Image (cartoon, rainbow, N blue to C red):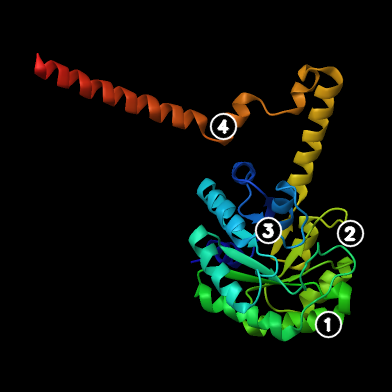
Amino acid sequence: MNKLKSLIQRKEIVVAPGVFSPFVARLAEKTGFHAVYFSGAAFSNNLALPDLGVITMTEVYNEVSRITDAVSIPVIVDLDTGYGEAVNVQRAALHMIRAGASAIQIEDQVLPKKCGHLPKKEVVEVEEMVKKIIAAKDSSSGRLMVVARTDARSVEGMDSALDRARAYSRAGADVIFPEALQSVDEFIEFRKKISKPLLANMTEFGVTPYISVEEFRKIGYNIVIFPVTTFRAAMKAAERALQTIKKYGTQKGMLEAIMTRDEVYKVINYYEYESADSSIMKRARALLKRDNSGRN
C-alpha cells in the first residue's frame, strides 16, 4: 500500500515539515516525523529563484530522487500547477513515481503562480483543474496519492472553494488542500462539508492564523504541512553566521548555535560509511595476503 495512504488510514494526523534538500529530509526523519513535504517555494528559494512556477520538472525530479534516496518515510511533492496542461501532468506523475514520491500536489492557479498567501492570484477554470487531476490519477494507477489544492478562497470566496473541492473530489483527488483559509471556523466548515482527507497549510507570515497540530487534530484534519519553516529558519541562521564572521572575523562566539561536526556526521551516517570502508579494506588486505602467500 502507498506509504502516505497507510499513515492516513491509521486515523492519526500526519505532520509533514517542508524540506528542500536530502540533509533536511534526513534530519526530519531522525527527529521523528513520519512524512515530509517537498516544498516548491523552499526549493525555488534555495535556488535563489522566486516561487512563480519557474522551476522545471527535471530540477524537481532530480532533487526528489535524492531526497527519497536519503529517507524511508513518504515524500509529498509540490508540483505547482503541474508544468502545463493535463498531458504535462501525466508525464510529471510518471516521473514522480520513478523518483519514489508517495504523493503529488497540484494547484488550480493561473501561471505565473504565486504563494497562496499573496494577493492578485488567479485561478483556472474548474474544468482545466479537473482534467489535470484525472490525468494524474490515470498515470499513477494508484501508486501516487493526488493532493488537489484550491486557491479559490481568496479569489472567489469560500463557496467557490468548497464547490471546487467537491468537483476535485469527484475527479478522483485523494486529498483536498484548501489554501489560505483565514480562520479556524473556515477550516471547520471545510471539514464539515468535504468528506475527503484534508490537508492544512500552517505557513508563517500568511493570512492563516497560527493553529497548532493538536487543534487541527481536533478539527479532523489529516495532514498538516509546514512548507517553508525549515528553509526560513536555516537561512536566518546562515545570515547571522555570515554577519558574525563579517563583524568579528571569527565564528568562535557562535559555536553553540551551530551543529557540531559529530552532529552532522550522525545525520549523514558518516560512521557507518567509515566502518563499512574499514571492513572492506580488511577483507581486501586479507585477500591480497593469501594471494601473496600462494605465490611464495
Indicate the amino acid at tag 1.
Ser
Distance (Cα) linking label 2 and label 1: 21 Å
Q: Position of residue 222 (x, y in %)?
A: 69, 65
Assign a secondary structure to mark 3: loop
Is the C-beta separation of discs 4 and 3 under 8 Å? no
Q: Residue at x 58, y 77 (%)?
A: 87
Indicate the amino acid at tag 2.
Pro
The image quadrant that residue 176 belongs to is bottom right
Mark closer to the observer (1, 3): 3
Identify the mark nearer the N-term, 3 or 2. Answer: 3
Please say whether residue 157 is visible from this viewpoint: no
Question: How dense is the environment of label 1, judged by Cα within 10 Å: few (below 14), some, or many (20 and up)?
Answer: some
The residue that label 4 is drawn on is 266
Circle number at residue 293: none
Q: Residue at x 80, y 80 (%)?
A: 162
Indicate the amino acid at tag 4.
Lys
Circle number at residue 209: 2
Q: Residue at x 78, y 17 (%)?
A: 250
Q: Position of residue 86 (x, y in %)?
A: 62, 78
Distance (Cα) linking label 1 and label 3: 29 Å
The residue that label 3 is drawn on is 55
The residue that label 1 is drawn on is 160
Q: Position of residue 282 (x, y in %)?
A: 31, 22
Identify the mark nearer the N-term, 4 or 2. Answer: 2
